[in-house]
Image: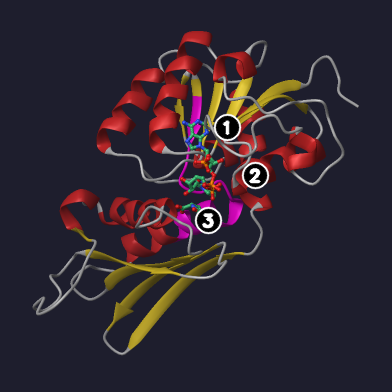
C-alpha cells in the first residue's frame, strides 16, 4: 500500500531489461511508488500494464510513449535507456526540478556536458554501476593504484557482458579505470588503451588497458588486474541479478530527494570514501 509521502517515481525504458527490474524494485522497497512508465515510441511495451510487464500483479500504470504525460506529478525518474533519450530527459528533469537517476552508459563527452548543465535544476545521480559491490570495488582499486607504483605494476580492466550490450568498454569498466587513474593522479583519457590489434609494440608504462568480452546472458563481470613482476592481483565483481542495480537506483532516488540540485555519484549516495 502506498503512503502520501512516498516518493513518486517514473521508469523510463520500462520494457527494457533494467526497466522491468526497476518496476520490481519500486514495488518491493518501502517509501517509493510507481506513478508512471514510458518507453520508446513504437516499443512493444506501449499500452501494457507496468506491473504485468515486470511479472507482478497489474498496478494500473500504463506504459506510454509520452514522457511528459508519464512525468506529470512525479518526484523523480529512473533512467536506464540510451544516451540520446537520457540527455533529453535530463533537460526535462532540470526544468521540472526532478530527481533523475541515470544508469545509461555509452554517453559521449557532449552528452556528459549536457547532463552537467541539467544538474543546475535537477538532482541527478549518475553512475556506470549502481551496485554497492562495484562502488566499494572502485574505492579498493583507487587505493591499490595509489599504493602500487606505475613503474612496477600494470593495470588492465577486463569486462564481460551479455550479447545484447551495445556499448564498450562498459560504464563500469570506465568507472573502475577512472578510479585507478585517480589513485595514480593521471588523466584516464590520456593514458587509456582501449584497443590492441596487430603489432602493437611493448606496453607503454603507466597506461590503463581495457579488454571487452561479449556473449550469452552474462549480467556483468569486471576484473581489475594489477600485474607486477612475478605476481598479479585480481579484483573482481560478478553481477548475477539486475536487482542489484535496480535497488541501488531506488536508494539513489530516495537519497537525491533530500539533496540540493546537482550532479552526484553512487559513491556520494553510499557514503563511500574516495580520496579525490
Ligand atoms: N548503471 C548501471 O548500474 C547499469 C546500467 N545499465 C545501462 O542501462 C542501459 C539500458 O540497459 P538494458 O536495460 O540492458 O537495455 P534494454 O535495451 O533492454 O533497455 C533499454 C530500454 O530503453 C528504451 N529506450 C530507448 N530509447 C528510448 C527513448 N528515446 N525513450 C524511451 N525509452 C527508450 C528501449 O526501447 P527499445 O528496446 O524499443 O529501443 C528499451 O526499452 C544501458 O546503457 C546499460 O549499459 C544496465 C544495467 C546496470
Ligand atoms: O548493459 C548492461 O547490462 C550493464 N551495463 C552497465 C555497464 O555498462 O557497466 C552496468 C552493468 O555491468 C550491466
Taking the spot 74% from the left edge, 44% from the top edge, the residue there is 54
Q: Is residue 195 left or right of residue 248?
A: left
Question: Which numbered disc, 3 or 2, marks the residue that appears first in the sequence?
Answer: 3
User: What is the total number of numbered labels drawn onto the structure image?
Assistant: 3
Disc on res. 39: 1
Q: Residues within 10 Å of mark 3 (few under 14, many from 20)?
A: many
| Secondary structure of the residue carrying numbered label 1 | loop
Taking the spot 44% from the left edge, 39% from the top edge, the residue there is 82
Please report the bounds of the magenta region as a residue range.
124-140
Residue 132 covered by magenta stretch: yes
**Camera-nearest label, 3 or 2:** 2
Residue 108 covered by magenta stretch: no
Residue carrying label 2: 246
> Nearest the camera: 71 or 276?
71
Taking the spot 50% from the left edge, 40% from the top edge, the residue there is 103
| Quarter of the picture holding the C terminus | top left
**Camera-nearest label, 1 or 3:** 1
Question: Which numbered disc, 1 or 3, marks the residue that appears first in the sequence?
Answer: 1
Q: Tell me if the residue at label 1 has its CB under 8 Å from ligand 1.
A: yes
Decide: is 9 above or below 143: above
Q: Tell me if the residue at label 3 has its CB under 8 Å from ligand 2.
A: yes
Residue carrying label 3: 134
| Secondary structure of the residue carrying numbered label 2 | helix
From mark 1 to mark 2, how far is it between C-alphas?
A: 17 Å
| Quarter of the picture holding the N terminus | top right
Q: Residue furthest right?
A: 1
> Nearest the camera: 88 or 270?
88
Q: Where in the figure is residue 110, as x and y percent of width and height? A: 26, 31
Residue 29 visible, this orientation:
no
From mark 1 to mark 3, how far is it between C-alphas?
A: 28 Å
Q: Tell me if the residue at label 2 has its CB under 8 Å from ligand 1.
A: no
Q: Is residue 129 left or right of residue 4?
A: left
Amino acid at each position: 500500500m502506498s503512503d502520501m509521502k512516498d516518493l513518486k517515481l517514473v521508469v523510463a525504458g520500462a520494457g527494457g531489461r533494467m526497466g522491468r527490474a526497476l518496476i520490481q524494485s519500486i514495488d518491493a522497497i518501502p517509501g517509493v511508488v510507481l506513478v508512471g512508465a514510458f518507453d520508446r515510441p513504437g516499443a512493444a511495451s506501449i499500452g501494457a500494464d507496468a506491473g504485468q510487464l515486470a511479472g507482478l500483479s497489474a498496478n494500473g500504470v500504463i506504459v506510454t510513449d509520452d514522457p511528459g504525460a508519464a512525468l506529470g506529478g512525479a518526484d523523480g525518474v529512473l533512467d536506464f535507456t540510451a544516451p540520446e533519450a537520457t540527455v533529453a530527459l535530463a533537460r526535462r528533469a532540470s526544468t521540472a526540478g526532478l530527481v533523475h537517476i541515470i544508469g545509461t552508459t555509452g554517453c559521449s563527452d557532449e552528452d556528459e556536458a549536457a547532463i552537467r548543465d541539467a544538474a543546475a535544476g535537477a538532482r541527478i545521480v549518475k553512475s556506470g554501476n549502481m551496485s554497492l559491490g562495484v562502488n566499494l570495488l572502485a574505492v579498493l582499486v583507487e587505493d591499490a593504484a595509489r599504493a602500487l607504483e606505475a613503474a612496477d605494476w600494470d593495470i588492465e580492466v577486463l569486462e564481460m557482458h551479455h550479447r545484447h550490450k551495445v556499448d564498450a568498454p562498459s560504464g563500469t569498466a570506465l568507472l573502475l579505470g577512472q578510479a585507478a587513474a585517480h589513485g595514480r593522479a593521471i588523466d584516464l583519457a590520456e593514458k587509456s588503451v582501449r584497443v590492441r590489434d596487430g603489432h602493437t609494440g611493448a606496453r607503454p608504462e603507466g597506461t590503463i588497458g581495457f579488454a571487452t568480452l561479449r556473449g550469452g546472458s552474462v549480467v556483468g563481470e569486471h576484473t581489475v588486474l594489477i600485474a607486477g613482476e612475478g605476481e598479479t592481483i585480481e579484483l573482481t565483481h560478478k553481477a548475477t541479478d539486475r536487482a542489484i542495480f535496480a535497488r541501488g537506483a531506488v536508494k539513489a532516488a530516495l537519497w537525491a530527494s533530500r539533496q540540493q540540485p546537482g550532479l552526484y555519484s553512487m559513491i556520494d549516495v553510499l557514503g563511500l570514501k574516495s580520496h579525490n
